Image (cartoon, helix red, strand yellow):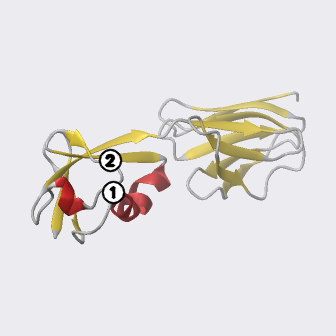
Amino acid sequence: MRLSLITLSGSEVMTLDAQPEWHLHDLQGCLHHRFTAQGMRARLFFNGAELLPGKPLIEMGLEDGAQLGLVLAFEPRVAVASMSGQAAIFSAASFEVLRRLEGGHEQAIWSVAFSPDGHSLLTASSDGTAKTWSTGTGQCLQTFRGHSGRVFSARFSPDGAMIATASSD
C-alpha cells in the first residue's frame, strides 16, 4: 500500500510503499535515516490519533492512499565532555548514549555547544583547539587552531555561520 506523509500545513513530504502487516516500527525504520540523523524524532498521525506500536497498519485502518500526518520534533539531547578529552551526546529522556565523538581532543574539554540547527557540536579544549562535530555521525568536521593557550569556551553565532572562542592566551 502507498502512504503519503503530510505536514500539518498539508504539504506532502514523501510517499512510502508499505505492507499492510507492517507495524509502526517498520514505518519508523523507513524514516530513520531521513530524519533521525538530523536529531529529529518523527511522530505519525492518522485520523487525528497518533499511531502507536502493537498493531499492524491494516488493523489501524490504513489503506492504500492513506495520508499520515507527520510531526517532527528535535529529540531532547545533552552533550557532555570529560577531562580525558572525550565527549558524547545523550538522550535527555532515556540517558542513552546517542553518539560518541571519535578522534577527540588530546586534553580536557572545557565546553560543548550545539549549533542553532542541531546538526553540529562545538567543543573547546585545553589542547588549544576548538572542534566542530557532526551530531549525526560523531565525526570531527573541522579543527580550529590558533590559540597558544587553553581554549576554555566556544560558541556558535546565532545563525551558525561563525564561532567565537575564549582562551587563556
Q: Is residue 116 above or below residue 85?
A: above
Residue at position x 34%, y 43% in the image: 72
Question: Does residue 155 appear left or right of residue 118 in this picture?
Answer: right
Give the quadrant of the N terminus: bottom left
Q: Which residue is mark 1?
A: 24
Q: Residue at x 59, y 39 (%)?
A: 94
User: Residue 119 versus residue 20: which sits nearer the camera?
Assistant: 20
- Asked which secondary structure carries label 2, the reply is loop
Say the numbered circle drawn on residue 12.
none
Q: Nearer the viewer, residue 124 or 161?
A: 124
Amino acid type shown at disc 1: Leu
| Residue 74 left/right relative to 130 | left
As displayed, is residue 96 above or below residue 113? below
- Which SS class for mark 1? helix
Q: Residue 32 at what x, y percent from top left?
A: 42, 59
Q: Position of residue 4 (x, y in %)?
A: 17, 59
Which of the 4 quarters of the picture holds residue 155?
A: top right
Residue at the spot 55% in from the left edge and 31% down from the top edge? 157
Q: Earlier in the sequence, mark 2 or mark 1?
A: 1
Q: Please, is residue 72 above or below residue 102 in the view? A: above
Residue at the image point whose x is 21% and y is 40% from the top:
49
| Type of amino acid at the residue the image marks with label 2 | Leu
**Residue tagged 2:** 52
- Tell me if label 2 and label 1 are in contact, CB under 8 Å: yes
Residue 129 image-quadrant placement: top right
Answer few, some or many: residues within 10 Å of disc 1's Cα (few below 14, many 20 plus, some between 14 and 19): some
Q: Residues within 10 Å of mark 2 (few under 14, many from 20)?
A: few
